[in-house]
C-alpha cells in the first residue's frame, strides 16, 4: 500500500489556475486539464499533442498526456469492482506503457531545460517532482516497491528544492510532500526496512495531514489533488468516513462525468451507513461511466451497475479499499 499511496496522489493532477505567482500558465492548458478531470482521456491526449507543438518547452504539455495515459491504463488494468476501487493493478503491463513512459520522459526533459535557467529553476524542480510522482504512481499501482520508493525519494528531493528556491511554491509542493510525510510514517515494517535500505528519510503522519490540508486550501495548481488524497486517507486509513464522503462528493459535483470519483463517493457514503445516498451515487457513477472512453466506460459501468444492485439488495462490501 505505502509507496503506492505516496505516489498515488496525482490521480487527476490539474490546475486551479492562478493569475499571479510562479504557477501562472497559458489559459489554453485549462480545457485539456478539464478533460482529464472528467475522464475524457482521448480528448485530453489530442489536446496535449497540440499543446506540445505550441508550447514545446512547457512540462505541463507532456504531463497532460502522461495523466491521460495513466487514466486509460488504470481503467484497463486497475482493481475495480462492485465493492471497491483500489489503487492496485490486476495486471502489470498495458498496451499503453510505451506511450506513458515517453510522455513522462518528455515532461522530465522539459523540466530539465526549465531547471537550467536560473529564472525558472524552481519551477523546473517543481514540475520534475510532479513527473516523478506520475511515473512512481504507475510503479506503485503495480506494487513494484523498489521502483516506486526510488521515485518517492526523488520526488521529495525535487519538491524540497523547488520551495527552497521559491517559497511561493510551498502550498503546491505540499501535495507531494504531505503525502510523503503521511505514508512514510505509516509504512509496514517491511517497507520501512526498504526505506532505510534506500536511504529514504522518514515521515510524520500528523505533519503530512496538515500539509495536505494546506495544499487543498491554498495551492494554485494542485488543490483538487490534495482534496482527493485527503478524501482517500480519511476514508481508507483514518476511518473518518463522513469527512471522506464530503470531500469526494464535492469533487464529484464539480466533475460529474468522472465515474472513478463518483464510485469513491458511493463507497464512502456506504461506509457512513447512508445506504440510500450510496445507491444514488452508484447510479450517478453508472451515468458518468457512459460518458467516458471505451475501456473506462465498460469497466466502470460494470462496477457501478454491480454496486447499485448490491446496495439495493442490502449487501455489504468486503473492505474499504487500498
Image (cartoon, rainbow, N blue to C red):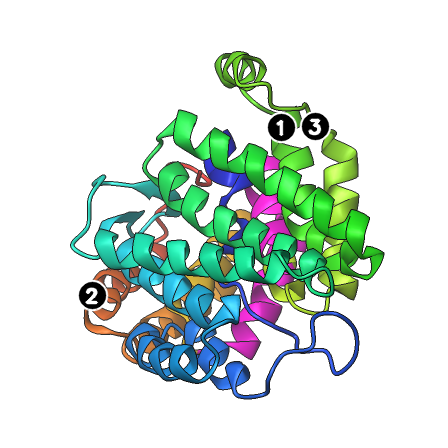
Query: Residue 184, which numbered label?
Result: 1
- Residue in the picture at 79% in, 79% down: 20
Q: Tell me the SS state at disc 2.
A: helix
Q: Which residue lies furthest to the right in this view?
A: 167
**Residue 254 in view:** yes
Comparing marks 2 and 1, which lies closer to the viewer? 1
Q: Residue 171 carries which label?
A: none
Q: Does the magenta stretch include residue 243?
A: yes
Instruction: Considering the whole magenta stretch, tell me its main secondary structure.
Output: helix
**Looking at the image, do the residues carrying marks 1 and 3 touch, with CB atoms under 8 Å apart?**
yes
Query: Image quadrant of residue 208?
Result: top right
User: Can you identify the residue that label 3 sits on?
Assistant: 203
Locate residue 148: give its quadrant: top left
Which range of residues does the magenta coloring cover?
A: 227-256
- Ranked by sequence position, the earlier of labels 1 and 3 is 1
Q: Using the image as rendered, state which of residue 219 and residue 151 is in the foreground.
A: 151
Q: How many marks?
A: 3
Spatial separation of the CA atoms under disc 2 and disc 3:
37 Å
Q: Disc 2 marks which residue?
A: 295
Q: Earlier in the sequence, mark 2 or mark 1?
A: 1
Amino acid at each position: 500500500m505505502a509507496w503506492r499511496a505516496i505516489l498515488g496522489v496525482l490521480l487527476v493532477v490539474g490546475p486551479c489556475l492562478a493569475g499571479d505567482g510562479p504557477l501562472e500558465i497559458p489559459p489554453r492548458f485549462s480545457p485539456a486539464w478539464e478533460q482529464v478531470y472528467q475522464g475524457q482521456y482521448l480528448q485530453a491526449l489530442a489536446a496535449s499533442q497540440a499543446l506540445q507543438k505550441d508550447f514545446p518547452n512547457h512540462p505541463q504539455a507532456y504531463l497532460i498526456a502522461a495523466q491521460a495515459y495513466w487514466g486509460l491504463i488504470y481503467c484497463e488494468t486497475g482493481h475495480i469492482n462492485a465493492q471497491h476501487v483500489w489503487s492496485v493493478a490486476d495486471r502489470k503491463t498495458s498496451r499503453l506503457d510505451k506511450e506513458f513512459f515517453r510522455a513522462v520522459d518528455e515532461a522530465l526533459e522539459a523540466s530539465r531545460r526549465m531547471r537550467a535557467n536560473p529564472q525558472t529553476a524552481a519551477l523546473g524542480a517543481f514540475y520534475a517532482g510532479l513527473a516523478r510522482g506520475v511515473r512512481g504512481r504507475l510503479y506503485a499501482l503495480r506494487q513494484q516497491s523498489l521502483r516506486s520508493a526510488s521515485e518517492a525519494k526523488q520526488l521529495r528531493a525535487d519538491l524540497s528544492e523547488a520551495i527552497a528556491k521559491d517559497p511561493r511554491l510551498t502550498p503546491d509542493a505540499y501535495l507531494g510532500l504531505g503525502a510523503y510525510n503521511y505514508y512514510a510514517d505509516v509504512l509496514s515494517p517491511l517497507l520501512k526496512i526498504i526505506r532505510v535500505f534506500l536511504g529514504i528519510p522518514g515521515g510524520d503522519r500528523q505533519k503530512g495531514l496538515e500539509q495536505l490540508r494546506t495544499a487543498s486550501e491554498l495551492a494554485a495548481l494542485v488543490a483538487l489533488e490534495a482534496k482527493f488524497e485527503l478524501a482517500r486517507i480519511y476514508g481508507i486509513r483514518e476511518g473518518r468516513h463522513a469527512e471522506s464522503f464530503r470531500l469526494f462528493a464535492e469533487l464529484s459535483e464539480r466533475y460529474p462525468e468522472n465515474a472513478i470519483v463518483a464510485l469513491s463517493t458511493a463507497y464512502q457514503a456506504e461506509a457512513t451507513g447512508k445506504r440510500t445516498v450510496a445507491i444514488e451515487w452508484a447510479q450517478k457513477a453508472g451515468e458518468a461511466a457512459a460518458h467516458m472512453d471505451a475501456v473506462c466506460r465498460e469497466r466502470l459501468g460494470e462496477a457501478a451497475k454491480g454496486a447499485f444492485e448490491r446496495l439495493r439488495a442490502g449487501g455489504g462490501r468486503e473492505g474499504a479499499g487500498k
